[in-house]
Image: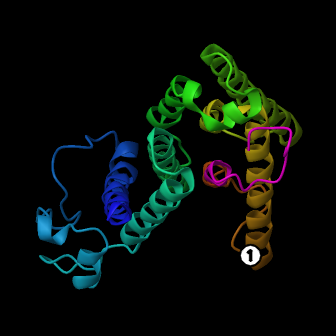
Amino acid sequence: MVTLLVVLFGFCLGSFINVVIHRMPKEQSLWHPGSRCPKCRRPIAFYDNVPVVSWLVLRGRCRGCGTRISARYPLVESLVAVLTWLLWERGGGGSWSILTILASAALVAVAFIDWDTFLIPDELSLGLLAVGLLSAPINPFFASALGHGAWYGRMLFSLLGAGTGFAICWATAEFGERLFKREALGGGDVKLLAAVGAWTGALGAFDCMMIGALAGSVYGVARMARGTLKRYEPMPFGPFLSAAAVFNFFKLLPFGFPFGPI
């Protein structure tokens, strides 16, 4: 029963993340007005706004005007629901599971917003940074690294992680700009990796940078091989950093083990 409620919560959270992805880049309110068709502006009734189910019942179209509704909506809802279920089960429930679920949902929003706009809203990156620092005393990654020491030791560990993430990404951005004579990484990426470091520690930030860079490089090379990406054409880095951070929450990254909090 608890698992079912967790999954249902995940679908509802995913529905809200869709709102964040759509409205936050436009600086629109996340609460008002209610959901409506972007073409005919018809308000979406509650029975047409059930995550995934309504999209399937309506066959991906608006009930009013028949405009096609992107499959991204059920995809995001399903992705967040799966992450919610997995993080809850892996974390054994409790406050830390809830925090990582919310952080992962925010990272999903970061990934899609950056993919669409090449921008990472400060509300998300700095919000993740603040919550990561404040939750450091109950962070199990830091407990495994530091033992059951004083809470302020974990806070310092989190601050070190945030500083390391910021420094790594900033140095990479500066080096890339000097080497290629163009912007290599945006300020949003720098703040995002600082936020990731606050959650995962210094080695976790390094892990995420390496895995994100590797995944981004593989994707970029594959697209260039297919002729869908030109050399030096910009590509968002936030989605790859976000994916690496979520993997880190599952302790799937190999780098640093057993020396770091992964």
Towards the viewer: 152 or 48: 152
Position of residue 153 measured from the top left corner of the image (x, y, whole percent): 68, 17
Q: Is residue 200 visible?
A: no
Position of residue 126 measured from the top left corner of the image (x, y, whole percent): 51, 29
> Residue sitting at 53 percent across and 43 percent down?
119
Tell me which corner region of the image, top left, top right, bottom left or bottom right, holds residue 11. bottom left
Which residue was labeled with disc 1? 227
Position of residue 177 measured from the top left corner of the image (x, y, whole percent): 80, 36
Q: Counting other residues with Cα less than 10 Å from the Cα at mark 1, is it few (<14), some (14-19), or many (20 or more)?
A: few
User: Is residue 25 found left or right of 239 in the rendered image?
Assistant: left
Towards the viewer: 227 or 203: 203
> Residue sitting at 36 percent across and 73 percent down?
70
Which quadrant is the C terminus positioned in?
top right
With respect to residue 36, does 228 lie above or below?
Answer: below
Which quadrant is the N terminus positioned in?
bottom left
With respect to residue 88, does 77 lie above or below?
Answer: below
Q: Is residue 150 magenta?
A: no
User: Is residue 236 found left or right of 202 in the rendered image?
Assistant: left
With respect to residue 259, does 5 lie above or below?
Answer: below
> Residue sitting at 34 percent across and 60 percent down?
2
Q: Secondary structure at mark 1?
A: loop
Q: Which residues are magenta?
A: 245-262
